Amino acid sequence: MGIGDKIKNAAEDAKGTAKEAAGRATGNERLEAEGKVDQSKADLKQAGEKAKDAFKD
């Protein structure tokens, strides 16, 4: 996994965490759900990159 991919995934995860927290704080269920989706996307991308790295070695 390249350092750029790690940074992008971490940023997407952080954005999702912030959205989820903001949604929870304001009672906005849609924003909270969007945050969870963003976090899930970042996790899936990270898992895919790790799988690619495992097959490279």
Image (cartoon, rainbow, N blue to C red):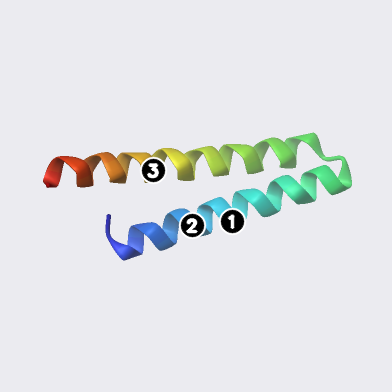
**Residue 1 sits above or below residue 40 on the image:** below
Q: How many marks?
A: 3
Q: CA distance from mark 3 to mark 1?
A: 14 Å
Q: CA distance from mark 2 to mark 1?
A: 6 Å
Find residue 48 and report its image quarter.
top left
Q: Which residue is the site of mark 1? A: 14
| Residue farthest toward the left in the current orientation of the protein | 57
Instruction: State left or right for residue 36 relative to residue 45.
Output: right
Badge 3 amino acid: Lys
Q: Secondary structure at mark 1?
A: helix
Relative image position of residue 25 (x, y in whole percent): 85, 48
Q: Which residue is the site of mark 2? A: 10
Q: Secondary structure at mark 2?
A: helix
Q: What residue lies at 65% left-to-right and 50% top-to-bottom?
A: 17
Find residue 20 and report its image quarter.
top right
**Residue 9 sits above or below residue 50 on the image:** below
Q: What residue lies at 42% left-to-right and 38% top-to-bottom?
A: 44
Badge 2 amino acid: Ala
Residue 45: which disc?
Answer: 3
- Of label 3 and label 1, which has the lower sequence position? 1
Q: Are marks 2 and 1 in contact (CB under 8 Å)?
A: yes
Relative image position of residue 41 (x, y in whole percent): 48, 40
Q: CA distance from mark 3 to mark 2?
A: 10 Å
Q: What residue lies at 63% left-to-right and 38% top-to-bottom?
A: 36
Q: Residues within 10 Å of mark 3 (few under 14, many from 20)?
A: some
Badge 1 amino acid: Ala
Q: What residue lies at 69% left-to-right and 54% top-to-bottom?
A: 18
